[in-house]
Amino acid sequence: METISRGLIRAFILLTLGLGAQAQMARLVSAPLLRLPGISDSNSPSHWTGGKLVLFNSDGMPIRSEDESVATLGRVRAVRLYSYEHTPM
């Protein structure tokens, strides 16, 4: 019984690894240069909400911008923090 379950586990792992390897693919293509609004220290988290892209940048203190696409991001606003306990410097 133990041999059968080990065989099933091995088969499952091999099948899972094989399927996962075939599903991964990457391709690089030429694209126009896009500049992010505001100053950034290289980390720019973003998310979509209500059909708009919301982008956060920082160079010590966070700033926020939003628009319908990364190409049209413009106006930058300061972000108010309720606690400055974990901010840099």
Image (cartoon, rainbow, N blue to C red):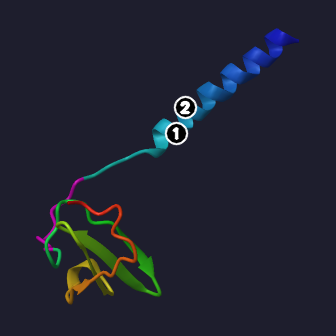
Give me the residue at 71% from left, 23% from top. Answer: 9
**Cα–Cα span, label 1 and label 2:** 5 Å
The residue shown at (20%, 87%) is: 74
Mark 1 — residue?
20
Q: Is residue 29 magenta?
A: yes
Q: Which residue is mark 2?
A: 17
Q: Which residues are magenta?
A: 28-35
Position of residue 46 relative to residue 20, above or below, is below
Q: Relative to the observer, which residue lies in front, 54 or 6?
A: 54
Asked if residue 20 is among those painted magenta in the image, a careful observer would answer: no
Amino acid type at image mark 2: Leu
Q: Which residue is more in the foreground, 5 or 86?
A: 86
Where residue 79 appears, as percent x and y from the top left, is: 30, 81
Residue ID at (75%, 15%): 6
Q: Position of residue 51 (x, y in %)?
A: 44, 86
Q: Are marks 1 and 2 in contact (CB under 8 Å)?
A: yes
